[in-house]
Image (cartoon, rainbow, N blue to C red):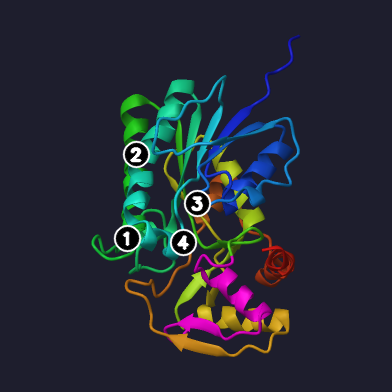
Amino acid sequence: MSKERQKVSVITGAAGFIGSHLSDYLLQKGHRVIGLDNLNTGTQLNLKHIDSEDYVYMNVDITSFIEVDGPVDYVYHMACPASPIDYLQMPLHTLKVGAVGTRNAIGLAKWKRARFLMASTSEVYGDPEIHPQTEDYWGNVNPIGPRSVYDEAKRYAETTTMAYHRQQGIDTRIIRIFNTYGPRMRPFDGRAVPTFIRQALEDKHLTVFGDGSQTRSFCYVSDLVEGIFRVMMSDYHMPVNLGNPAEYTIGQLAELIIEITGSKSDIIYQALPVDDPRRRRPDISLAKKLFDWEPTVPAEDGLKKTIDWFKGYLKEI
């Protein structure tokens, strides 16, 4: 009997925070991984630990034509500027990645007859009017606000994915990622977890926007990656929430990070950004039912791992 061919996975945004962890996971699963990134927001530091003949990195801008040699079984479309600092500084590029980049990535899947997974975001729900958020909620998004370039780019990318599925029969998946954290986050990307950790380790004031009462749900990256893989290996085509339903106020998060680090930092409060969501928490009933998936890493354990990584990383840069 002939040996089964090794599975091949393409990851766009492979040098990013989540993309690099997904690369590790798929290599452990025995896949050959082709990582695409133009290092606009990613970094090769996230990939320097990979020493495998089954990993290939290609410096590719996905808003240009994507060409990959050989067979491909799975395309994970993870690429997009994902922090407020990124998409506020690069609004047109963010829109282009969501539109042209998604079309090119799904075009690669079509060409290779591969399964395609679109990494969307909880931002498609905007400042939600229902809580927690379920996949059938259409959202409350300001289409012309400063955050809209990211929100609407992802909503458009979801629309593109479903259109290719319905009209051309592409085997697609859509995940909506809620706040995720862990090692390899950029310390200056403006998101709460890396910002608070960096400030706490440097004994600086932790800057909380608003009064700190707005809530988020934080999922450790290993839990998320497991969920991504389970969705890709399923036969479900509609959007799926992936996140941790444990809800924290931003104030609580800041206090927890100060406690874990033993920092002498105080908390200071600044004006709330425009259109910043007041509450954000996933309903993951669908993921539990269809994929037997739910997060297993408690926030305190995940934060300790993330803080330990940041201690070493901040000394290197």
Q: Residues within 10 Å of mark 2 (few under 14, many from 20)?
A: some
Query: Residue placed at 55% from the left, 21% from the top?
Result: 69
Residue 192 falls within the magenta-colored stretch: yes
Tell me where residue 89 sits by quadrant.
bottom left
Q: Which mark is residue 139?
A: 1
- In the image, residue 296 above or below residue 233: below
Q: Nearer the viewer, residue 234 or 5?
A: 5
**Real-space Cα separation, disc 1 to disc 2, in angstroms:** 23 Å
- The span shown in magenta is 187-212
Asked if the residue at tag 3 contacts the one at tag 2, i.e. Cβ–Cβ closer than 8 Å, the answer is no
Sequence-wise, the earlier of marks 1 and 2 is 2
Q: Residue 201: x percent and y percent?
A: 68, 78
Tell me where residue 86 sits by quadrant.
bottom left
Left or right side of 101 for 117: right
Left or right side of 155 for 267: right
Quadrant location of the C terminus in the rendered image: bottom right
**Callout 3 secondary element:** helix
Sequence-wise, the earlier of marks 4 and 2 is 4
**Kind of residue at badge 3:** Leu
Q: Which residue is mark 2?
A: 100
**Real-space Cα separation, disc 4 to disc 2, in angstroms:** 20 Å
Please identify, in this view, whether the residue under mark 2 or under mark 3 is nearer the observer: 2
Q: Nearer the viewer, residue 149 or 211?
A: 149
Q: Residue 33: x percent and y percent?
A: 63, 33
**Real-space Cα separation, disc 2 to disc 3, in angstroms:** 30 Å
**Callout 2 secondary element:** helix
Q: Residue 148: x percent and y percent?
A: 31, 60
